[in-house]
Amino acid sequence: MARKPAGTTRTNPITTHAAPRVPQRATIDIAFENQSLLGALFGQFDSNLVQVENRLGVFISARGDRLHIEGPEDSVARARDVLNAMYDKLALGQDLDGGLIESIIAMSNEPTLDGIISGKVDTPPIMIRTRRKTIVPRSAVQVDYMRSLARDDIIFALGPAGTGKTYLAVAQAVSQLMSGSVQRLILSRPAVEAGEKLGFLPGDMKEKVDPYLRPLYDALYDCMPPEQVERRLASGEIEIAPIAFMRGRTLADAFVILDEAQNTTREQMKMFLTRFGQNSRMVVCGDPRQVDIPGGDRMSGLADAVDKLEGVEGFGTIRFTAADVVRHPIVGRIVEAYEGPIT
């Protein structure tokens, strides 16, 4: 009978499988000092609590001035932070809606949640005050954007629709116009059709270009009473015009916003940026993946300008992704499905 050579052994491999980690269950109670805010906190038919439950996978029950939260340990901790943040916003006089709650939930994954939502003791809260509302950030990137709007001379805001690029820029512009920091508000965008030919448009020049500028009007009316918008438009304090009208001008003492900047040519972008004057601020908003001009991405003045100027003193660049969409949550999922994450 053959023997195995000395010094050799034969082993049968044993495959082991680690037991799946079972999330630890937890419960917690949180109390609120001002009971008059609880109705708004819970929402009609507890709709706000249901929204938090569904998004975080927890169970929330009300017990007088307390909320009892049950569920996986991590989710319970997030739900506690979200509910406290919602209460703090109500205590500051802000209104809760589904979009704001969704943004608080999204930001609850950020390590700086307390700084974003509540503001640290030694740090002023991040907000923009206009005549019609007080605007607070709804994503971590919006925090950086609002800081850049208050600090940098020229800001590039890049990212998909629904991230607040233009809206926050208009809000900051209105705030500075109201405070007297600037004397004029100038809103512009290229008059480029988005994938369809509209043909001849009737009316005078204003009536021809207004359809292209409608999103800017919408943001403006949301931040100022309509009668003030009309009065300031008539006096020239607020000007809304296509980019072609900017040539040959020097825009001093003004807050200037260029929307849909991905549809400018390189020549148009250079012309626009060199309009910058004393005591001015300029915001250039656009989605690099939505270029509608002939030639596509390679002809876009936005990408070219960012490539040349990013990092230059006085310039700020903020990049949004689908995760920063602050419209209905499904809009963010649509952007992700079509475009993937923006780098």
Image (cartoon, helix red, strand yellow):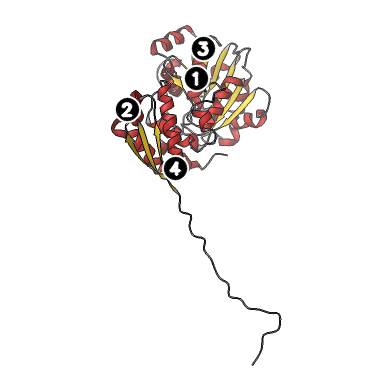
Residue 241 percent coordinates (x, y): 50, 17
Q: Amino acid at mark 1?
A: Ile
User: Depth-wise, is mark 1 or mark 2 nearer the camera?
Assistant: 2
Task: Write down the residue under mark 2.
Answer: 39
Q: Amino acid at mark 2?
A: Gly
Q: Earlier in the sequence, mark 2 or mark 4?
A: 2
Q: Secondary structure at mark 4?
A: helix
Residue 286 percent coordinates (x, y): 53, 29
Mark carried by residue 177: 3
The answer for how far apart the CA atoms under marks 4 and 3 are is 43 Å
**Circle 1/circle 3 CB separation < 8 Å:** no
Q: Earlier in the sequence, mark 1 or mark 3?
A: 1
Picture quadrant of residue 154: top right
The answer for how far apart the CA atoms under marks 1 and 2 are is 27 Å
The residue most toward the left is 45
Against 34, residue 13 (above or below) is below
Q: Earlier in the sequence, mark 3 or mark 2?
A: 2
Q: Is residue 295 left or right of residue 44?
A: right
User: Depth-wise, is mark 4 or mark 3 nearer the camera?
Assistant: 4
Mark carried by residue 75: 4
Q: Secondary structure at mark 3?
A: helix
The residue most toward the bottom is 1
**Circle 1/circle 4 CB separation < 8 Å:** no
Please name whichever residue, 252 or 323, is drawn nearer the observer in this view of the structure.
323
The answer for how far apart the CA atoms under marks 2 and 4 are is 23 Å
